[in-house]
Image (tube, grey):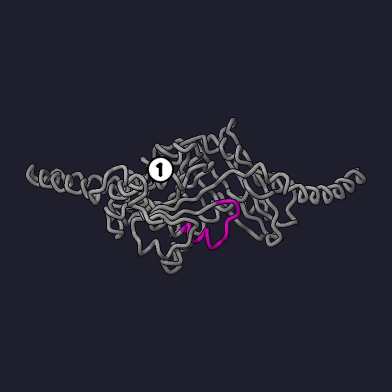
Amino acid sequence: MQDIVQDALENAEREEQARNDADADIDEFGDPRIVVVGCGGAGNNTVNRLYNMGIEGAETVAVNTDKQHLRMIEADSRVLVGKSLTGGLGAGGDPEMGERATEMARGTVKDVLGGADLVFVTAGMGGGTGTGAAPVVAKIAKEEGAIVVGMVSTPFTVERARTVRAEEGLESLRSEADSIIVLDNNRLLDYVPNLPIGKAFSVMDQIIAETVKGISETITQPSLINLDYADMTAIMNQGGVAVMLVGETQDKNKTDEVVKDAMNHPLLDVDYGGASGGLVHITGGPDLTLKEAEGIAQDITGRLEADANVIWGARIREEYKGKVRVMAIMTGVQSAQILGPDVQHQADQSRQALQHTAEGYSFGDASAGNAHGSSNAQSDGGRPESERNHGLDVVR
């Protein structure tokens, strides 16, 4: 048996060299086209971070109604939508404005996403542009034949009205995307309560960016145990809400500790026990063994249904010697509650308060509001629809 093991190790080195030599021949078949679209302020920040981190095999696109913010963003493509509608000054926290602005730029968004195989749509739910634009971008990507994964963050419970808008935006995005990975900003209070607020938000940006980078590079870059585009399609087609777990450790007993860290840090407080799909990606150093990697994947997915579709992969990176990181996405979580209990409770309370306020308006007030809404509906700069839909309201 020892001779077999020794032969295997020697052959592995030769095979690695052969694979490197064959790369040029294989390249002619192409890789899946992966596009990451950041909508609104939070989405743009994530894309900016991804661009600066460097992401192999994926393109970054920033979509916004706010030209000042967009100017500060680095991405492969930047799209200012609804220029004649908003004057480049943002959506004013109104998701309908964000939606209309993006619809006006449908032709350009379609051009940017044409030929994409996998599209990540990232945004912060509850604001104007991100909440309104993300479902439109997802719909266009689906029409172009891509697998669409939404990756969005939800507001803090204190952001009362935003929680209602976030819930509505999530429902819209859920109807357009194949799966939505929801990250609750309130979890930052558990993980980094004492960080300055700017740095705390950057932690969420980093989590989203690392996840997108990890998934994308797992598909496009060689791994110890590969995940390919077909694997991703099979998992993300499960639909519904997806829950993400992230764990990392340098502990001597790293296998158990990384699982414990991930299980104790779900980024959405929703039970994923009945999830129908699971994707687990493990990154470790040259000292990571096959037994350790398989054990981590087994423990992470132990709570899923017996017939759940589970796919796992592992990647070796020299800088991870002595430590291990696991990222797991549980898809097809059939939960009516997608905001987490605290945010959901706040959204319900805010909705009731808004309804109570609305019921107090007189019929005359409502009529005036409708007249104002009709005026807004015409705020398109007076351009023909054919022009608006072919990107003349867009600065790239």
Vertical order, 234 against 270 (above or below): above
Q: Main secondary structure of the magenta part?
A: helix
Q: Quadrant of residue 316?
A: bottom right
Image quadrant occupied by the C terminus: bottom left
The residue to which callout 1 is attached is 338
Residue count near mark 1 (Cα–Cα under 10 Å), binned few <14, some 14–19, many ≥20: many
- Reply yes or no: does residue 161 show up in magenta: no
Question: Is residue 297 toward the left or the right of residue 392 in the image?
Answer: right
Q: For the residue marked with disc 1, what is the amino acid?
A: Ile
Question: Is residue 128 toward the left or the right of residue 198 in the image?
Answer: left
Residue 346 visible from this viewpoint: no
Secondary structure state at the residue bearing disc 1: loop
Residue 181 in the image: state x and y as whole percent.
47, 45
Residue 337 in the image: state x and y as whole percent.
39, 41
Residue 249 visible from this viewpoint: yes
Residue 365 in the image: state x and y as whole percent.
9, 47
Q: From this viewpoint, which residue is outermost toward the bottom?
A: 196
Q: From this viewpoint, which residue is outermost toward the right?
A: 3
Vertical order, 192 against 38 (above or below): below
Q: Going 44% across and 60% down the picture, which residue do you hit?
A: 45
Q: Going 65% across and 53% down the picture, which residue do you hit?
A: 283
Q: Going 34% across and 51% down the picture, which residue do you hit?
A: 392
Boundaries of the magenta span: 46-58
Image quadrant occupied by the N terminus: top right
Question: Is residue 212 toward the left or the right of residue 22 in the image?
Answer: left
Q: Nearer the viewer, residue 343 or 139?
A: 139
Residue 118 in the image: state x and y as whole percent.
53, 43
Q: Going 55% across and 55% down the picture, which residue do you hit?
A: 210
Vertical order, 238 against 77 (above or below): above
